Amino acid sequence: MPEPIGTAHQPRPTPDTDNPRDPAMTLETDRADIIELFGRYADIADTKNFSELPPLVHTDPFTMDVESLGGMPPLQASLADYAHALSSSFEPFVATHHAITGHVITIDGDHATARAHVRAEHWVPDDVAAGGPNRWLVVGFYDNEAVRTARGWRFSKVKLTAAYQENAHLLASPGA
């Protein structure tokens, strides 16, 4: 597997910005496009845009792996099924905020791996919190796979590894 670009072992090439066919420029553009996927991915839940954004982020179908949150094995889902499930899961939250940082992108032709840190916060309504904590926090990593499609880069696999959670009981609360 190729090393991530920009490591001590493989310095980042200087792009020739006047030459759009320059391989370094393509690499930088590809990397930027994949990082943008993370932003759009976060916006799906944070803006509750369950219809327009998923096709801009994922292949159809794609694999979702959130086993570290509760033991559900990875599954392959169509975009329609994913959008419905995500809407049902996130609609009850008053607000969510997914901060995704520290991107490490490895590109190999039309395939890429993308690792990033995530801090995801999910606020429940006051009646669900019932005077207790109202925020479910998940901190961890995304280890995603992306493919270049005719419409640009898309995630073909999203894997969340939760390293820490607070108030996970709120996920199972009625109405959340």
Image (cartoon, rainbow, N blue to C red):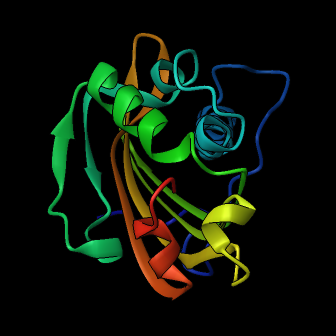
> How many numbered circles are shown?
0
Judged left or right of residue 71, residue 105 is right
Quadrant location, the N terminus: bottom left
Residue at coordinates 24% horizontally, 25% vertically from top-left? 78
| Image vertical order of residue 165 relative to residue 125, above or below | below
Residue at coordinates 32% horizontally, 19% vertically from top-left? 80
The quarter holding residue 30 reads top right
Q: Nearer the viewer, residue 12 or 130?
A: 130
Residue at coordinates 79% horizontally, 34% vertically from top-left? 16
Q: Nearer the viewer, residue 151 or 136?
A: 136
Judged left or right of residue 100, residue 16 is right
Q: Residue 84 at what x, y percent from top left?
A: 37, 27
Judged left or right of residue 69, residue 50 is right
Q: Residue 96 at what x, y percent from top left?
A: 70, 54
Residue at coordinates 17% horizontally, 40% vertically from top-left? 76
Q: Tell which residue pokes out farthest to the top in this image.
A: 150
| Image vertical order of residue 151 relative to residue 67, above or below | above
Residue 46 is at least partly visible in this image: yes
Q: Residue 134 at what x, y percent from top left?
A: 70, 73
Q: Residue 33 at what x, y percent from top left?
A: 63, 34
Q: Nearer the viewer, residue 23 or 109?
A: 109
Judged left or right of residue 152, residue 59 is left
Residue 123 is at least partly visible in this image: no
Q: Nearer the viewer, residue 97 or 109?
A: 97
